[in-house]
Image (spheres, grey):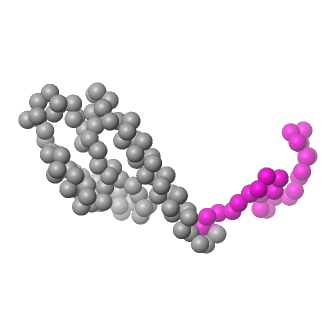
Amino acid sequence: TFQNCLKWLEELRQNADQNIIIMLVGNKVDLVEKDPNARQVFYDSATDFANTHKLLFKEASAVTNYNVKHCFEHLLQEVYNQAAKTSGNKADKSERGITIYPGQSMPGEQDQSCLSEAC
């Protein structure tokens, strides 16, 4: 059920990065396959809740492994897309860090080219 979802969302949004990607996963879908009356939350209600709170939404079953991998892959893809979009929009180089090219020493380091046997 959604008993604690709003509280958890509030905690996440207060303590995490503002661009956090959150996925709501309806678990135990295997029970509904056995007995449709076992459903605690209707699919449409969960979808509406997710849309209202700007969440991704999937259903899965940890017992049968149904959709579990897909949930993780979808979430990972969304995180990757968000990171790519965010890093592409930053104009200030100090926010992006620095770029080190092959053969270039780190800022603040003395150039010690080939002083070790690994060169």
**Residue 100 shown left or right of residue 65 in the figure:** right
Residue 41 visible somewhere in the drawing: yes
Residue 34, compared with residue 51, is above or below; it is: above
When asked about the image quadrant of residue 7, the answer is bottom left
Q: Is residue 81 above or below residue 62?
A: below
Q: Is residue 27 magenta?
A: no
Does 84 sit left or right of 117 as displayed? Answer: left
User: Is residue 91 found left or right of 108 in the rendered image?
Assistant: left
* Residue 36 in the image, given as x and y percentages of width and height: 11, 34
Number of numbered discs visible in the structure rendering: 0
Give the magenta-colored segment's residue range: 94-119
Residue 9 vs residue 72, the one in the foreground: 72
- Seen from the viewer's position, the closer of residues 52 and 4 is 52
Residue sitting at 25 percent across and 38 percent down?
27
Task: Confirm whether residue 3 shows in the render.
Answer: no
Task: Name the quadrant containing residue 52.
Answer: bottom left
Residue drawn 81% across the image and 56% down it: 104
Question: Foreground residue, 2 or 44?
Answer: 44
Secondary structure, magenta segment, majority class:
loop
Picture quarter with the C terminus:
top right
Residue 102 belongs to the span the image colors magenta? yes
